[in-house]
Image (cartoon, grey):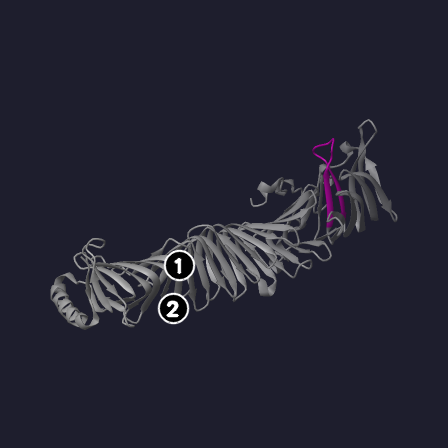
């Protein structure tokens, strides 16, 4: 039997019912009915329910422990301390949290809410839109498993699932997370987001795309307010035409700065080069980067690569006008040459590589002999030929980046182990050297000013004729496979060929001769040793 209470009877009922519930609620905290347009019961269809409805603009108001829920219709079960309601739901938790939906269920025993249908949850920091939302008032947690959208002061956030921790003002987003901001877009599989500071913590594949940068990681932190963060696990930053990788990456967009630690790789997409190391920094405003801790620069040249290792490698300059500078214990390596020096510079605009030695101190100049001083000089190896001097320039062909020519300034010394006499060395000493290359091999060499030569001469049957010792103004050599094949002497050469047994062994080496083959890097693994 359905009982209907009209408005003139309802006020007495509400007073009596509310008073009774109030007395009863001292311990059990029963949901209170503050008002309703009408009250009915239908024990057949809704056993135990008080059916409350809107009438004459009087809506249903239910109240429980600081929360007011307004609706058009509510089915309230006093014994269960539970109700379900529908029709333009308005939920207020004080003046701090507001919820709107089409439908709602509320369990007063455990203070949990399920709201569905055009759900909108909001407070002073954000607004949440989803189809179905669950709210735990005891733990102050709201979560959804239907696609949701959150709008805060600066961003719009979307995800397939999410949890909002009200006390911490923190979101946990799961599946297809998207944040749109005027300065960047962020996609992630899972992240925690703190509303007040706009901090994001990533726990799965994530990508941030800014106006001039792109970041990928699978673990990390990002402050979207100041665009600063730290990124780990397969982390990559695309920045200033460079791709930066490392075990740990750090980024500051305001300061136009990025750094990387451990297993660092910086790819220069414009200049087709790579720098590896264990620590690196990129300064966009200065168009520069610095790499330390076993760095190796790799310039990719067609089917070959030029490797440069040092204690520190610095890149400066804009695209196609970049300068690579390497300091301390520099080594270079490619298929055609190997080298070593104190420092190196490579200017890409004119394709010039400079091998430079550290200036000797006044004391070193006084106490070191010429051999010891020559041990400090930059040095190159071409097959069996060893070339050294105070300063070495290598010029590459800009059309194909292959070696074009070589210049050695001051104290030029060429040494080559004799192919037949393992205890003998062909040697050429002079002031300056000029040479050119063909297909990566030395072809012609000229040495001038106070030139001295020691050269082993053989018959066509490889029988030793003698040893040529000559002094002249300059010489020219023709090379084959980076070995000396022919020497021409200029301007009053003074020398002769003597049998080996007639030459004192001390006279078989020019002053300043050094054989530094043990210093030569043989492969990439030798570069950081």
Residue span colored magenta: 412-429
Rendered position, 418 above or below 285: above
The x and y percentages for residue 362 are 62, 60
Q: Pick the residue in front: 124 or 347.
A: 124
Q: Which residue is mark 2?
A: 125
Tell me, for residue 501, which label it has, or none: none
Q: Answer with left or right where residue 224 lies relative to residue 271.
A: left
Q: Pick the residue in front: 145 or 495.
A: 145
The x and y percentages for residue 160 are 42, 53
Quadrant housing the N terminus: bottom left
Mark toward the viewer: 2 or 1: 1
Task: Work out whether residue 194 can be spotted.
Answer: no
The x and y percentages for residue 385 are 72, 41
Q: Pick the residue in front: 132 or 280.
A: 132
Residue 427: within the magenta? yes
Quadrant housing the C terminus: top right
Residue 449: within the magenta? no
Q: Residues within 10 Å of mark 2 (few under 14, many from 20)?
A: few
Q: Which residue is mark 1?
A: 130
Q: CA distance from mark 2 to mark 1?
A: 17 Å
Q: Pick the residue in front: 321 or 32.
A: 32
Q: What element does badge 1 sit on?
A: strand
Rendered position, 167 above or below 496: below
Q: Residue furthest right?
A: 492
Which of the marked residues, 2 or 1, is nearer the chain's N terminus?
2
Main SS type for the magenta part? strand
Q: Which quadrant of the structure image shows residue 104?
A: bottom left
Task: Work out whether residue 279 can be spotted.
Answer: yes
């Amino acid at each position: 039997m359905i009982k209907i209470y009209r408005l003139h009877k309802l006020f007495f009922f509400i007073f009596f019912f509310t008073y009774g519930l109030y007395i009863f609620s001292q311990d059990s905290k029963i949901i209170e009915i503050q008002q309703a347009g009408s009250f009915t019961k239908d024990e057949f269809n809704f056993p135990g329910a008080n059916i409350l409805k809107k009438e004459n603009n009087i809506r249903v108001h239910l109240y429980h422990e600081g929360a007011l829920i307004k609706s058009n219709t509510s089915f309230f079960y006093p014994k269960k301390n539970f109700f379900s309601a529908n029709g333009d739901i308005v939920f207020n938790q004080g003046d701090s949290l507001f919820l709107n939906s089409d439908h709602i269920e509320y369990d007063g025993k455990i203070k949990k809410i399920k709201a569905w249908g055009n759900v909108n949850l909001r407070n002073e920091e954000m607004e949440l839109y989803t189809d179905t939302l669950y709210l735990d008032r005891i733990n102050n947690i709201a979560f959804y498993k239907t696609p949701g959208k959150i709008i805060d002061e600066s961003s719009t956030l979307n995800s397939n699932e999410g949890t909002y921790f009200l006390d911490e003002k923190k979101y946990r987003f799961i599946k297809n997370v998207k944040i749109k901001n005027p300065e960047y877009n962020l996609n992630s599989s899972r992240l925690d987001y703190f509303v007040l500071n706009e901090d994001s913590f990533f726990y799965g594949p994530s990508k941030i795309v800014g106006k001039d940068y792109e970041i990928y990681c699978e673990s990390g932190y990002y402050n979207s307010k100041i665009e600063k963060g730290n990124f780990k696990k397969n982390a990559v930053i695309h920045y200033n035409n460079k791709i930066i990788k490392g075990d740990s990456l750090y980024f500051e967009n305001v300061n136009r700065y990025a750094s990387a630690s451990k297993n660092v790789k910086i790819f220069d997409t414009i200049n087709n080069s790579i720098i590896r190391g264990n620590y690196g920094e990129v300064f966009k405003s200065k168009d520069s980067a610095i790499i330390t801790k076993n760095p190796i620069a790799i310039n990719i040249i067609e089917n070959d690569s030029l490797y440069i290792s040092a204690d520190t490698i610095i890149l400066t300059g804009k695209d196609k006008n970049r300068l690579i500078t390497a300091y301390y214990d520099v080594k270079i390596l490619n298929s055609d040459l190997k080298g070593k020096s104190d420092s190196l510079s490579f200017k890409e605009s004119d394709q010039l590589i400079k091998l430079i030695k550290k200036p000797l101190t006044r004391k070193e100049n006084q106490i070191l002999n010429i051999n010891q001083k020559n041990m400090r000089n930059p040095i190159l190896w071409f097959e069996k030929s060893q070339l050294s001097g105070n300063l070495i320039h290598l010029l590459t062909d800009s059309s194909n980046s292959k070696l074009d020519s070589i210049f050695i300034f001051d104290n030029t010394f060429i040494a080559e182990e004799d192919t037949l006499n393992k205890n003998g060395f062909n040697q050429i000493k002079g002031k300056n050297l000029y040479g050119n290359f063909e297909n990566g091999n030395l072809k012609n060499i000229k040495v001038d000013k106070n030139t001295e030569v020691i050269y082993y001469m053989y018959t066509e049957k490889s029988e030793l004729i003698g040893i040529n010792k000559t002094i002249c103004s300059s010489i020219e050599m023709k090379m084959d496979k980076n070995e000396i094949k022919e020497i021409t002497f200029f301007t009053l050469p003074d020398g002769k060929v003597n049998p080996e047994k007639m030459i004192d062994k001390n006279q078989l080496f020019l002053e300043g001769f050094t054989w530094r083959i043990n210093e030569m890097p043989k492969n990439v693994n030798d570069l950081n040793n």
